[in-house]
Image: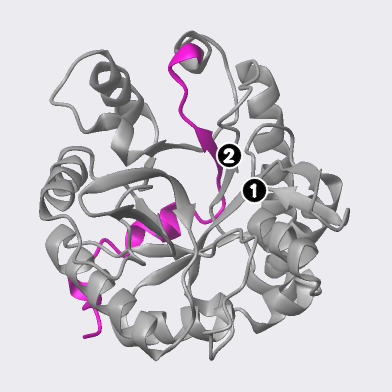
Amino acid sequence: MQFSPALADQDGAHSLSNRAGVGLKPQHAVDIFGSGHGVGFFEVHAENYMGAGGAPHRLLGRVRESFPLSLHGVGLSIGSARPLCREHLGRLKQLVERYQPALFSEHLAWSSHGGAFLNDLLPIPYNAESLAQVCDHVDLVQETLRTRLLLENPATYLVFEASTMSETDFLHTVASRTGCGLLLDVSNVYVSAVNHGFEPMAYIDAFPLEDVAEIHLAGFAVDRNDDCAPLLIDSHGSEVAEVVWRLFQRTLARTGPIATLIEWDNDVPAFSALAAQADRAQAFLTAQARRRVRTLNA
């Protein structure tokens, strides 16, 4: 069932389209409010704010008064073969109603089984059975939250023989059937491309870019697989790599400015380092917006 745009805040994605944001970290509270910076919005992991109150909500409330907010879920288990946890979904609904985020996103992955929540985002096969399950889950989430869900492409380390369609075709079909939007994680594209041996820009060329309302950029770690070939890990523990910045710039040339988030969740640096990454993303967004204006006025 396709989601009705009338149920969603369609101005949310548009209001952030030319802004670069960062993940909200409690240790940065003083810098967020005590110094000038160019960060355009903040994003939080929903599961970190599912308690009723306390210090996390006091900080998030202050941030929401001054900045737009993006809410990023990591525990809905959209790709699970089992029904979604209604209790978890209910807590998520309370968060959305309380903070009215401009954007809400989740992962194309599963992360729970038999009532247990796993500390990982696990891949799914891309076939008709998974497609039906994901679409049903996306429909339920959007109708419950009364807002549009952005579904994120995963970083993967294996592929399934049971898959009968590409990842990009799968995401395109989910978006078409449910009316959801997409979150394009450019770093995930590069990680998966190296791990599976495909060309990252070819993936982006095939991606349903018309449905993208947010972009993520993050650092990755380099390891080796059993054959000693490079294996990239989506670690969120370092600066965005230069190769990902180039891929981001090429993507913006196709899409125009889109709300862009810097993810840095491990080995978190000083706020100034995080803000500098957002400033770099902002420079690309601003330059692309100016190119679009010049093109329209030509």
Name the image quarter holding the N terminus: bottom left
- Tell me the kind of residue under disc 2: Glu
Q: Which label belongs to residue 206?
A: none
Contact (Cβ within 8 Å) of mark 1 with mark 2 = yes
- Left or right, residue 207 beside residue 201: left
In magenta, the rendered stretch is 1-27
Q: In screen coordinates, is 13 left or right of 264?
A: left
**In x, y percent, where is residue 187?**
68, 54
- List x then y, in percent, for residue 147: 23, 61
Magenta stretch encompasses residue 147: no
Q: Position of residue 210 (x, y in %)?
A: 53, 78
**Magenta stretch encompasses residue 19:** yes
Q: Which residue is mark 2?
A: 263
**How many numbered marks have been drawn onto this rendered protein structure?**
2
Question: What's the residue at 47%, 8% (across, down)?
Answer: 30
> Circle 1 sits in a helix, a strand or a loop, which is it?
strand
Residue 282: in sight, yes or no? yes
> Which residue is at the far right?
228
Which circle marks residue 217 in the picture? Answer: 1
